[in-house]
Amino acid sequence: MAKRNIKIFSHNDLDGFGAPVLVKTVQDVMFPDAEFDLTSIGAGRIDSELDYWFKSPEAATATDVWIMDMTPDSEHTMQELNQQFANHWLVFDHHETEAALRQKFAANTVKPADAKISPSATSLVWDWLKTLPGFVKLNQERQQQLAELVELIRAYDTWDWQNDPDMSEKERQAADDFNQLFWFYPLDHSEAFVQSVFDKGWTAYRQDNDLLIQTLNERRAKYLKSHLKDVVEATADGHRFGIVYASDYKSEIAHELLVQQPDLDAALVISPKSVSLRSNGKVDVAKFAETYYQGGGHADAAGGRLDINPIRLGEQAVADELEQMTSVKKEEKAETESTLADNLDPDMAAKLAALFGKKED
């Protein structure tokens, strides 16, 4: 049997790693003839990555291309996929921003099994796996174990862990804890972390890492409290935004900001290279992110790239202020010394000169 070399491009958040790790987890049972190669990508970079990859020797050896948790922005990229891989490429994506483009290539787009449930990339992969003949080779216990993990990822990524009134408190907490653990590890360890959870199952992994999860929850509570003290408001496109800087817990901070200040239309959380947006339904932040931040997402949750570095701007502002302060101090000192010399009468000046060992000419 000929080997299939399947190239996977996916986003670098929990859902973006969950989707490819899921197929790798069932590889021995469902894809024994396949080898997977994963490239994880930041938001807004799929077109440039694919353009570079199409020209590489690696592309010539690939039999299939799967794109997960993102959609190319350019129709040209989709046409290139069609030309080079015909019916051997698939997109597993749920973001609303590129829904119209995916519809043009519906034959290569995986759709959710239940339109009433908001999907994630991981749940789309799971729905698709269940349609394949090899799925029945997974025993029932393993199916249930994987289904639980898929649902935890889906619930967090779509924010149903906060918004679905029918979700149990236990499931909400599990979705939150799984995501917390994911962001605790460095990016180059993300795939290994997610794979370890899929290998063990959530219950066992949760028990083994109970103290770490408790510590992370306490740290997050302190982080949110301190960062939400410094919120700047701004009006854009007729909507009121709350803006706050945070390098961690961006989704949680945005959500909590809107809870604390319901009069705001949206929250905009900035970090050195990206923005995270959340809306309370008054503004479509996916369109806003696409227009101003080269991003996209959902109407109530989106993200994008930041062209300026707020940390560097802040450091430069401090440097400028420091330079100005030292300059003012020098001027004040010079003025004080000049004023003192001007006010001394000749006799006093002579006495001071003699005191400090200076002789008059």
Image (cartoon, rainbow, N blue to C red):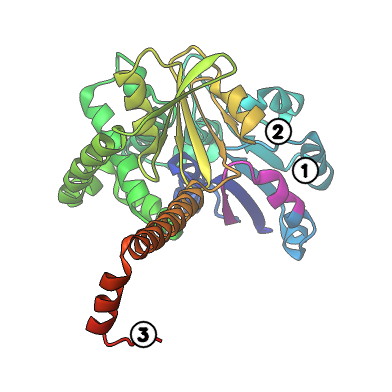
Instruction: From the image, tell me which residue sits under label 3.
Output: 360
The residue positioned 29% from the left and 77% from the top of the image is 350
> What x and y, as percent, mark residue 153?
39, 35
- The magenta-colored residue range is 36-51
Which sits in the foreground, 164 or 146?
164
Residue 354 vertical placement versus 198 (above, below) = below
Q: Could you tell me which secondary element the residue under label 3 belongs to?
A: loop
Which sits in the foreground, 205 or 240?
240
Q: Is residue 126 visible?
A: no
Q: Is residue 50 visible?
A: yes
Instruction: From the image, tell me which residue sits under label 1.
Output: 81
Which sits in the foreground, 297 or 168?
297
Q: CA distance from mark 2 to mark 1?
A: 10 Å
> What x and y, as percent, mark residue 218?
18, 42
Q: CA distance from mark 1 to mark 3?
A: 91 Å
The residue positioned 72% from the left and 29% from the top of the image is 107
Q: Left or right? Give the position of 146 relative to 313.
A: left
Circle 1: residue type:
Leu
Q: Is residue 114 magenta?
A: no
Q: Earlier in the sequence, mark 3 or mark 2?
A: 2
Residues at marks 2 and 1 touching, judged by CB atoms closer than 8 Å: yes
Q: CA distance from mark 3 to mark 2?
A: 96 Å
Instruction: From the image, tell me which residue sits under label 2.
Output: 108
Q: Could you tell me which secondary element the residue under label 2 belongs to?
A: helix
Residue 118 vertical placement versus 289 (above, below) = above
